[in-house]
């Protein structure tokens, strides 16, 4: 699954650590999400979308 | 505490508390074991006391473990679950090969050990080898999981 996490984070000038703190996850998790090597659970995906103020499909795109 | 996350603080409590509980339990078990050896009539209660002490230590360890587990995020949990499954299974597979080898050539193993281990110690060593193989497998797969997601 592709996502726009890195772009959305950069737009707000947040570091990975900042985003990790806001989402209450580890920085390593943010890195794994941004590189598309870890797909979040539905609750975490919703939390991310809510934090950026976008609908979930604007943050995550299914590659299928 | 020093700007650490809740998960990190609980990990410190988990590791530190487990070590402290193991030390206290070990000293208590050693004291009871020594008493049991001096007073032969005390041996059966000593075995029970050591068993109960170690159960209490493990209960503390698992309680701290649970507190830490509730604080970690889902990717961290996934890494541990995946690593325990695949690393633990791989470790057990290696253990199964060793098990079959020892079972197939018991005289060669006896000759190699040359009475170095009593039956009780051999049993302990067998259990420890299986546990170590699983932990090594888990650690390797856990490192691999995070390396693949850098």
Image (cartoon, helix red, strand yellow):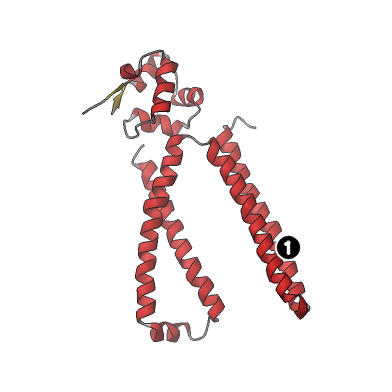
State the residue in front, A40 or A8.
Answer: A40
Residue A26, x across and y down, in percent:
47, 32
Q: Residue B67, how many percent across, how many down? A: 59, 40
Q: Residue furthest left?
A: A64
The crowd level at tag 1 (other Cα within 10 Å; few <14, some 14-19, many 20+) is: some
Q: Residue at horizontal 42%, vertical 46%?
A: B81
- Residue at 71% x, 74% y is B44
Q: Residue at x 69, y 60 (%)?
A: B53
Q: Quadrant of the C terminus of chain B?
A: top left
Q: List the residue tagged with mark 1.
A: B28
Return the residue nearer the eye: B105 or B59: B59
Compared across the picture, whether B40 is left or right of B55 comes to: right
Q: In the picture, which quadrant includes the N terminus of chain B?
A: top right
Measuring 31% from the left and 18% from the top, which residue is drawn there?
A: A57
Residue B58 at x, y percent in the picture? 61, 55
> Where is A12 relative to A5, above or below?
above
Relative horizontal placement of residue B86, taking residue B2 as reference (left or right): left
Give above or below for B143 relative to B93. Answer: above
- Seen in the picture, residue B71 relative to A43 is either above or below; the reply is below
Regarding mark 1 in the picture, which secondary structure is present there?
A: helix
The image quadrant of residue A50 is top left
Q: Report the chain holding disc 1.
A: B
Query: Which quarter of the figure has residue B68?
Result: top right
In the figure, is residue B27 to the left or right of A32? right
Total marks shown come to: 1
**Where residue B106 appears, x then y in whole percent?**
40, 83
């Amino acid at each position: 699954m592709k996502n726009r996490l890195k772009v959305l984070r950069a737009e707000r000038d947040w570091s990975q650590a900042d985003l990790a703190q806001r989402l209450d996850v580890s920085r390593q998790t943010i890195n794994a999400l941004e590189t598309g090597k870890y797909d979040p659970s539905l609750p975490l995906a919703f939390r991310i979308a809510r934090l950026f103020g976008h609908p979930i499909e604007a943050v995550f795109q299914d590659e299928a | 505490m020093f700007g650490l996350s809740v998960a990190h603080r609980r990990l410190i409590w988990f590791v530190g508390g487990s070590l402290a509980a193991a030390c206290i339990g070990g000293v208590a078990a050693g004291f009871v074991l020594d008493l049991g050896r001096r007073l032969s009539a005390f041996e059966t209660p000593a075995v029970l006391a050591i068993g109960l002490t170690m159960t209490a230590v493990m209960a503390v360890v698992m309680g701290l473990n649970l507190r830490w587990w509730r604080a970690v995020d889902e990717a961290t949990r996934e890494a541990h679950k995946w690593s325990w499954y695949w690393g633990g299974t791989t470790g057990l597979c290696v253990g199964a090969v060793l098990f079959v080898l020892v079972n197939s050539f018991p005289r060669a193993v006896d000759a190699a050990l040359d009475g170095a281990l009593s039956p009780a110690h051999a049993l302990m060593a067998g259990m420890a080898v299986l546990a170590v193989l699983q932990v090594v497998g888990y650690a390797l797969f856990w490192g691999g999981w995070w390396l693949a997601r850098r």
